[in-house]
Amino acid sequence: MTTLNFKARVPVYDANVRVGDRPEEVSPCRNREDLLAEMDRHGVERALIYHAQGEHRSPIDGNEDLEGWLGDDGRLQPLWSVLSSDPSLAQIKDLHAKGRVNCARLHIHDTIHQLGLIFKPWAYDTLLSWFSDNHIPLWIPLLETENEDIVTTLLEYPNLVTVIVGAHYRHSLWVRPAMKALPNAYLELSRYEPLGEIEALRDEFGVERLVYGSYYSRFIMGPMLFYLHHTNLSDDELKLVCSGNLERILANAGKS
Amino acid sequence: MIEGIKVIDFHGHVGRWDKWVNNYDQKLMLHAMDSAGIDISCLFNTFYPDGTSGNDRAAEFVGRHPDRFIGYAVVSPEMPERMVPELTRAIDELKFRAIKVYPPYTTCEIYKPPWHPIYEFANERKLAILFHSGVEWQNHTRYLAKIAPDYPQAIFVAGHSGNVAEERADAIAGAQAHPNIYLETCSTFRTPGVIEQLVNEAGADRVLYGSDIPVMDPRAQIGKIITAEISDEAKRQVLGGNASRLLGL
């Protein structure tokens, strides 16, 4: 039964939260306490967070900026940013050596945005091989590169676990063949809202392939969580989408 | 029904759009509506400039569940001779309750004379007109303030409330200046603070919940209203109170 107010009824671990400001976009949460208050408002227990500066210009600086948000209560976990460059990968390797990396978010900045490096195996082999060899799952945002390149490049790394982020209704024709082609890919759901698609993807691919993320603060935190709570997913399935699948992905990091 | 309020989705589509929607199906629409307490979805078909072809399809679709769906009449100034006759037919014979226009499919700005017969018809019949609004050159939200004062009995609704910040600001300014401009909420841009901004700056009595069903699932879009930091009374107005008034329900 729907009411005028909503809070999650299952444990929620948000797989996609951005913190900090972009130069042109001031975050509504000014600090860690603001973010935790927003999470509390929707019943979100934990979140993977990355820094806006890592997305915008420098994963290296963004990861340094991220440190101040993490705290020690375990509610905010790092989703380290990485770019296909030697200094960026070196930073990730250093963090990994300290036992601090169990996931990362790739920033591509390819020719669509007239920057950087197109997502091809010849350009990303060093980075993708390292993540694959070390069994570290990689978050890959759509809209930063050609959809086709995401599939054809990831096919070269069949052991790499990925979380595809930000699929939009304009990706509707792409999502199914991509999920078929990439059995190690999970679909993050923050923007994927064509009619009935979450239940349909559950039926076709299994609930284990779906991961809740809000894409906050680019988008508001509550609506997709509300949506998930008003599907015909069972409570066990809902728990998997809202937290269990992400927990499993992270728990398997580093394991062969 | 949500806590006693009849929930009305003010913005939805009829007609397949296969490149974007895999699951175009009335049963799925009803399932999504039922799952979130949505009583009625307002639907239209914007794909035919003659109006009639799309309106007939919308009538057939709506007619299967007239208690759950309401039709809007679509016409286009690209076929000007058909506008008023088709509006008359759609409202009087098909029993549609409002008008939808999609300016990006046309070749002139919405304040220009080719559009005026639609506004005159709406003014005479006291109908709402739902505009697609946003960055497209035909339908900047600031144009609504140019036309609304000349047709005080018609209701001008900015679909998507302009979608982006600059357009949204103009839509709100229009609503503040003119009592017959309303703002509708569906958008794939779920920017933080938008629902709160619309309600706080234009007034809860001027905001209408819409989803763009089936392009967007109404459960995600109604979640924007339910999870917004606005009062329960404001939610009641946005979710259905305002729409019931405008549609004469």
Image (cartoon, coloured by chain):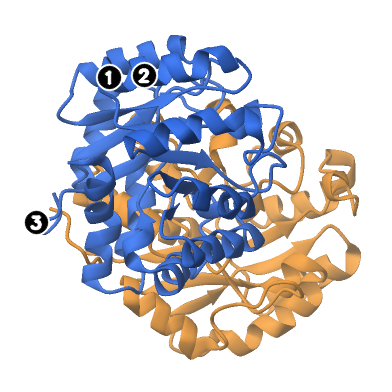
Chain colours: A orange, B blue
Give how far across and how far down residue A188 sits, in percent. Answer: 50, 50
Amino acid carrying label 1: it is Asp
| Label 3: few (<14), some (14–19) or many (≥20) C-alpha neighbours in 10 Å | few
The chain letter for the residue carrying disc 2 is B
Closest to the observer, A194 or B43 = B43
Which residue is at 27% across, 68% downward? Answer: B234
Disc 2, SS: helix
Give how far across and how far down residue B205 sits, in percent. Answer: 31, 63
Amino acid carrying label 3: it is Gly
The chain letter for the residue carrying disc 3 is B
Residue A197 visible in the current orientation: no
Q: Are marks 2 and 1 in contact (CB under 8 Å)?
A: yes
Query: In the rendered image of this protein, does residue B81 appear above or below residue A42?
Result: above
Give me the C-alpha separation between circle 2 and circle 1: 6 Å
Query: In the rendered image of this protein, does residue A14 appear above or below residue B159?
Result: below
Q: Residue lying at the far left in this picture: please name it.
A: B4
Q: Is residue B136 left or right of residue B222?
A: right
Which residue is at 70% across, 55% downward? Answer: A131
Whether labels 3 and 2 belong to a single chain: the reply is yes
Q: Which residue is mark 2?
A: B88
Q: Which mark is residue B4?
A: 3
| Label 1: few (<14), some (14–19) or many (≥20) C-alpha neighbours in 10 Å | few
Q: Is residue A69 left or right of residue B16?
A: right
Query: In the rendered image of this protein, does residue A45 appear above or below residue B156?
Result: below
**Earlier residue among tags 3 and 1:** 3
Q: Which residue is mark 1?
A: B92
